[in-house]
Image (spheres, helix red, strand yellow):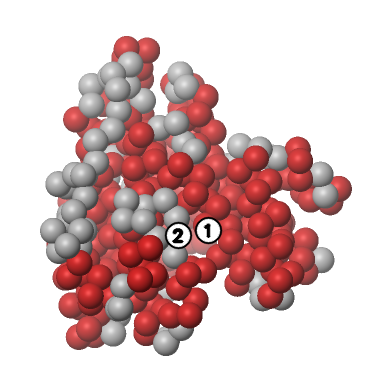
Amino acid sequence: MIRLPFTRYPEFGVENTEYAYACGLVRALETRLLDKVKIDRLLVLKDIEEVFKALQDTDYGKYLNEIHAPSDFEIMLKKELQRIYELLDELAVDEYIKVDTRYYYDFHNIRVLVKAFISEKEFDFALSSFGAIEPKVLKTIFENEEFDLLPTCLKDAVLNAIENYYERKDPQWIDLSIDRDTFKYYTTCSESDFIRNYHKLQVDLKNFLTLLRLERIERKDMLKYSILPGGFLGEEIFLEIADSNSLLQEIKLTPYYPVLAPGYSYYQKNGSFIKLEKDIESYLVGFVRETRKKDLGPEPLLGYFYSKRNEIRILRMIMVGKINGIPKELIQERIPEVVG
């Protein structure tokens, strides 16, 4: 029976008085996060126009004059994300915080550009402007094949993805390869305890879901290529265990069990991963909420960033649902907890 070195969440953070001003400001900003009551109110509104009106007195209200059609909601969400990044750049004392929070989008962009490089097509529409490296700079690097100009973690991800593709001539290996390198970076290379531990938790939970998905389609032969590195449990347990039910019993004494067991039961009865996915996201939201217990240091600032990113994702789910006429019950069953 496996045990983990924490009972609910792993510890993180060391006090840093240089973040005193940032922490004080973040505590004030947290009061404007959308809480469960506000999200529930948005869910019962009949259409996206009513959602826009309901957001007038929130952080998103300042962007509503740029909304001219329902599909323009992405303008609002991107501008709010841009504001959060500007705040992070202003308040973060440590450079690694600025870099690590942007590398999400750099890994995304190299995924897009590797596929463009392989297929000799343009996918500029899929590039994000939120990375640490401007998309036009990345494009030039790919056009000239000057991959040595990239940070080591990104260069390795590019070369590994290209090699994996040409070995098998299957585009899915680009995704598998970049996923592995993305999580390898975040679980081992980040200087932030919080960021590393967040992704270690994410890796373990995603790996359980991957095991279950591959069992469903009878492709466990793909397991050794699909399991992500860097989690607290390690890759070996997922590769050596007989099946997902055996793994669930093996982790019964860990904090993962109460997160995964209800969703696993729901999957067995309904054949759906919805509850598992929601419960996993909610557990990670709970880890973000732990940053509120820290008085000094970068963690409250990171916690606010992760909270806003989660909030934006939830708003996108609601707005897409309203545009497509999806019943509120179906939207609600996919929405994880909010930090606010």
Task: Residue 12: give x, y in percent of width and height.
Answer: 28, 33
Task: Residue 143: give x, y in percent of width and height.
Answer: 84, 51
Task: Residue 17: give x, y in percent of width and height.
Answer: 32, 12
Task: Residue 222: give x, y in percent of width and height.
Answer: 49, 76
Quarter of the image holding residue 30?
A: top left
At 56% across and 47% down in the image, what residue appears?
105
**272 vs 225: above or below:** below
Q: Nearer the viewer, residue 99 or 324?
A: 99
Q: How many marks?
A: 2
Among all residues in the image, which is located at the extreme top? 17
Residue 6 in sight: yes
Q: The residue under label 1 is which amino acid type? A: Asp
Q: Which residue matches tag 1?
A: 179
Crowd around label 2: few <14 · some 14–19 · many ≥20 (10 Å): many
Mark 1 or 2, nearer chain start:
1
Crowd around label 1: few <14 · some 14–19 · many ≥20 (10 Å): many
Residue 328 in sight: no
| Quadrant (top left, top right, bottom left, bottom right) of the C terminus | top left
Q: The residue under label 2 is which amino acid type? A: Leu
At 40% across and 60% down in the image, what residue appears?
235
Q: Which mark is residue 155?
A: none
Among all residues in the image, which is located at the extreme right? 144
Q: Which residue matches tag 2?
A: 228
At 75% across and 38% down in the image, what residue appears?
149
Q: Secondary structure at mark 1?
A: helix
Mark closer to the observer (1, 2) = 2
Q: Nearer the viewer, residue 273 or 71?
A: 273
- Kindly report the distance in space between the C-alpha atoms of the residues bearing marks 1 and 2: 7 Å
**172 vs 152: above or below:** below
Q: Are marks 1 and 2 in contact (CB under 8 Å)?
A: yes
